[in-house]
Image: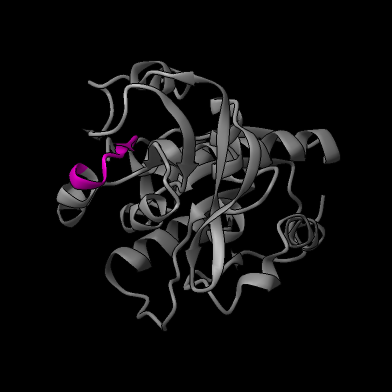
């Protein structure tokens, strides 16, 4: 498949142009020859040297990532950025990035996948960011304990990056915003959510969670954002018959 056609496919699938105003990421094709053939696509969370090397070793012609190389302002192509681009060019390995378009996609997004794992019903958009709701909230069919709720995400109290277990014994209302969205817990408090799930924690929210009696679970920025790229990989295989591979380079954060 020609890269130009794959670029058009991704752009339409994730509605990339709609989020230019609110997202600092340069979403879309960041590096690549539009006329190059793509026989295999790799998928990963982060654009980094380790991911590039492993994608090349896997025989990929394109790497699709959630966190790309370019964020909101011009950058000098020196140092680490130069080395990353050099690895891509030598591959050659094209790079496509989808940040917020992948977080908030109603079917393929990070948050949609987490909501499905939780088994939530009555799902609605949640978590306003620059005027757009990027996460989801919903109701559990039957109330769960905190440990039962974490288990649905493959987490425990010990494996969470951080856990503030300050809420009720019985959890019904759950909200999810993947990645670095600790401050959105204030919106969860306003909406009387029982359990708020994100990737990272912030010191400043501690007493608000304690006093507001809400459970706050930070599953890890990386872990909560592996879902979307995996979902897109499956869709690409289904729609285009293209060989795909997920490149797992966890940070533990």
Q: Is residue 168 above or below residue 66?
A: above
Q: In this view, does 54 lie to the left or right of 21?
A: left
From which residue to which does the magenta span run? 210-219
Residue 204 visible here: yes
Q: Which colour scheme is used?
A: one colour
- Observer-nearest of 198 and 16: 198
Determine the residue positioned at 58% across, 58% down: 98
Quarter-wise, where is residue 224 in the image?
top left
Number of marks drawn = 0
Q: Where is residue 117 in the image (x, y as percent from the top left)?
A: 56, 26
Q: Can residue 91 be seen in this view?
A: no
Q: From the viewer's side, name the closer residue of 124 and 68.
A: 124
Pinpoint residue 81: horizontal percent, then vertical percent. 35, 66
* Furthest residue in direction bottom, as rendered: 74
Q: Where residue 11 sits in the image (x, y, percent)?
A: 73, 62
Q: Nearer the viewer, residue 135 or 186?
A: 186
Residue at 19% across, 42% down:
210
Residue 216: in magenta span:
yes
The x and y percentages for residue 83 are 35, 61
Which residue is drawn at the image coordinates 47% and 37% (left, top)?
A: 174
- Look at the image and say whether residue 22 sits in the magenta stretch: no
State left or right for residue 206 relative to residue 1.
Answer: left
Image-quadrant location for residue 72 = bottom left
Q: Is residue 247 left or right of residue 109?
A: left
**Is residue 223 depicted above or below 148 in this figure?**
below
Q: Quarter of the image holding residue 71? A: bottom left
Picture quarter with the C terminus: top left
Q: Is residue 1 above or below residue 59?
A: below
């Amino acid at each position: 498949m020609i890269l130009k056609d794959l670029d058009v496919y991704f752009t339409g699938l994730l509605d990339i142009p709609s989020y230019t105003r609110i997202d600092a990421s340069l979403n879309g094709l960041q590096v690549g020859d539009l006329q190059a053939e793509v026989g295999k696509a790799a998928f990963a969370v982060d654009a980094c040297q380790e991911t590039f090397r492993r994608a090349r070793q896997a025989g990929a012609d394109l790497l699709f990532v959630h966190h790309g190389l370019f964020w909101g302002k011009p950058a000098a192509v020196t140092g680490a950025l130069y080395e990353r681009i050099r690895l891509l060019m030598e591959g050659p390995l094209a790079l496509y990035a989808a940040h917020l378009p992948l977080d908030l996609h109603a079917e393929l997004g990070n948050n949609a996948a987490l909501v499905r794992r939780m088994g939530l019903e009555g799902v609605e958009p949640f978590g306003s960011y620059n005027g757009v709701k990027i996460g989801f909230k919903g109701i559990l069919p039957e109330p769960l304990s905190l440990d039962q709720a974490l288990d649905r995400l493959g987490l425990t109290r010990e494996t969470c990056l951080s856990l503030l277990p300050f809420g009720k014994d019985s959890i019904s209302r759950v909200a999810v915003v993947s990645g670095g969205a600790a401050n959105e817990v204030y919106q969860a408090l306003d909406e009387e959510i029982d359990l708020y799930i994100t990737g990272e924690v912030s010191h400043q929210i501690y007493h608000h969670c304690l006093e507001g009696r809400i459970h706050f679970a930070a599953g890890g920025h990386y872990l909560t954002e592996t879902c979307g790229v995996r979902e897109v990989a499956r869709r690409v295989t289904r729609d285009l018959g293209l060989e795909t591979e997920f490149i797992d380079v966890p940070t533990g954060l």
